[in-house]
Structure formats: C-alpha cells, structure tokens
Amino acid sequence: MTALARPGTSDAKPGAVPTTALVLGALALALAWPLPILLSRARWPARSPGLALVLWQSIALAGGLSMIGALLAYGLLGFGTSPLAGIRSLSDHPGSGAVPVGMTFGQVLALAAGLLLAGHLLLNLAATFLRARVQLRRHHHLVALLSEPLADRPGTRVIDHEAPVAYCLPGATTSATVLSRGLISLLDADQLRAVVAHERAHLLQRHHVVLLAFRSWRSALPWFPIATRAETAVGLLVEMLADDQARREVDDRTLATAIALVGSAHGPVTGAREPGGPATRPETGTRETDAASLAGPDHPFDLLTPRLRRLVVPTPRLRRHQGFGVLAASAGLLALPTLLLLG
C-alpha cells in the first residue's frame, strides 16, 4: 500500500488521539457500565415506565454511536482534522489503495474496527427482524389452524389447552390476542378483561419492536453484560406499560389478582424452555413461542414481584419537572455523540 499525501490530510502528529475520540470513548464507557447499572437499580422507573423506556433507548443508541464514533474519529485522524472532514477526504479517493503520509497502523485498525462494528450491528438488527417475521408468519398460521375466534371479542383467538395461557401475536397486517380455555376458566370476567387489555396494549404500543431491538443488541454483543441487563430492564418496563393500560379497564386489585393467579398456576420453574419448545412468561400468565414473545427475559418469574408491588403499593408518577429532566437527559445523550462527530 503506497503512502501518498492527499489534500485534506490532518497535520496531527502520528499516534495522537484527537479530543473527539477521547470524549466519545469516555462517553461510550460511561454508557456501557455505570449509567445502565445505576438505571437498572433505580426505583423511579416503576413510577414512569414510559420515560424510563425512552432513557434506555437513548442509552443504547448513544452508546453504540459513541463506540463506533470513537473508533472512526481516531481512524479518520489521518484524513482530516475532524471525523466529518476525514470522511469527505476519504470519499474523494475511493479505491485508490493509498493512505495519507504519517497514518499509523493503529489508525487503520481503528477505522476498520469501527466500520466492522457498525456493519455487524446493522446486519444483526436486520437478521433479527427478518427471523422474527418468519417466525411470526408461521405462528399466525398455526394459531389459525388450532384456535377459534372468541365471541364478542374481535381479534381474540381461543386454543383448547388446560394451562392458563395468554399472549399477543403481532403482525404486519393482522394481530391477535391468544387465550386458552384454562385461562378463561381460571379467571372471572373482570380479571379476564384485565389480561386481554394487557396483551392488547403490547400490540397497540408495538412493544415487540422495542424488544426486538434490544434482543438484537444482546445477540450482536453476547459478551457485553450490559446488553443482557438492558434487555431484562426493558422487558419489565414494557410489562409495566401494558399493566398501566390494563389499569384503565379494571382496578389495581383486580389486575394484581389476575397476575398473581396465573403466575401461581405456572409456578417459578415454568420460565425454563424445552429445546425447540415455547417459552413461558408466568408473570403475565402467558405461554408463548419466541415469535410471540419477541425477547423475553431469561428469568421472567423474577419480574412478577416488582409488577405486583407497584399495583399493591400506590406509587405516584414522576413530577412534571422530573419528567422533563428525564426527557432532556435522553435528548442530550443522543445529541452529544452526534454533535461531536459532525463538529
């Protein structure tokens, strides 16, 4: 590979680390370890799960952008004084096989690593959504064959199974809420209405999309402990959001009783998966396939207690100024790496 000087080449010393790369690296480190741990241990997300979900998404997006940006900012140092200038300089000479004079092997390695990481995350995200779409289509077909519609409840299907089962089945054009005979016989009318409202909230708020994104993050970085922690925390938050929607249909006591009844019917060991079989979510009384759950936590029974606690013990929502603070922090996390890369 021939070393040639080219217009726009940075005057930085070989091996120097630009401030942009250092700041992005520090931000990536903060978003990869202390901040997610603090958020997962905080108590306020149960008071406003929607705001907490926004913050988790901002942490995930800003963390990924910071990791990739730190590598690119250092790798592009040989092409320009800023990442944006380096990209412009690099794009002026596609396929030339030449690099600027003074560019180090470490910068070339960082540039390649940044591009590979970005491609890996995007391809894994696309593969996760494609895989889920195929599974959902297959599951929709099975439900149509093995269930029948429930009278007076459009979009609800009933399967002949003695175990208490309820889950939502999203689809591009058609969605369904699936119940079992065992669930219908276990719960009274109000409790059943609570479960149906909970599952439909998952469909209306499209929680499966959020869960798929975090499942993709975990599968792309299986060695990254924060990805697993984030997926579990987000899984609990979407359950709380669905609970909040169900609370508009029934009182808290009825909803808590329905959750406890179905959870106790399954028991704490039903979260285990059989090879090739369905997964169970005892905290909502749901037994569902991977296509239906679209990323459930590894130990779903552990999520039963915090959900019941917030229904039994009244917890006020965050005050308005606190909510604005969470939204401002979320926006700031997304804006900071973007501004650093474009500055």
Image (cartoon, helix red, strand yellow):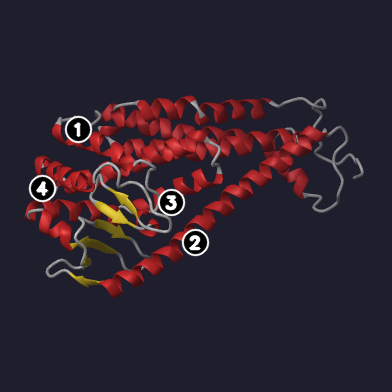
* For the residues bearing labels 3 and 2, Cβ distance under 8 angstroms: no
Residue type at the position of mark 4: Val
Q: Closest to the observer: 105 or 150?
A: 150
Q: How many labels does the image show?
A: 4
Q: Of marks 3 and 1, which one's residue comes earlier in the chain? A: 3
How far is disc 3 from disc 4 in space, using C-alphas? 29 Å
Residue highlighted by disc 1: 309
How far is disc 2 from disc 1 in space, using C-alphas? 37 Å
Q: In which quarter of the image is residue 152?
A: bottom left
Q: Where residue 295 sits: x, y (%)?
A: 40, 49
Q: Is residue 205 visible?
A: yes
Q: Which mark is residue 250?
A: 4
Q: Residue 212 carries which label?
A: 3
Q: Of marks 2 and 1, which one's residue comes earlier in the chain? A: 2
Q: Quadrant of residue 323?
A: top left
Q: In this view, does 164 lie to the left or right of 114?
A: left
How far is disc 4 from disc 1 in space, using C-alphas? 17 Å
Label 2: element kind: helix
Q: Around disc 3, counting alpha carbons within 10 Å, would you say few (fewer than 14), some (14 to 19), or many (20 or more)?
A: many
Q: In which quarter of the image is residue 15?
A: top right
Pair 3/1: label in front: 1
* For the residues bearing labels 4 and 2, Cβ distance under 8 angstroms: no
Residue type at the position of mark 2: Leu
Q: Where residue 129 sits: x, y (%)?
A: 48, 58
Residue type at the position of mark 1: Arg
Residue highlighted by disc 2: 130
* For the residues bearing labels 2 and 1, Cβ distance under 8 angstroms: no
Q: Is residue 201 visible?
A: no
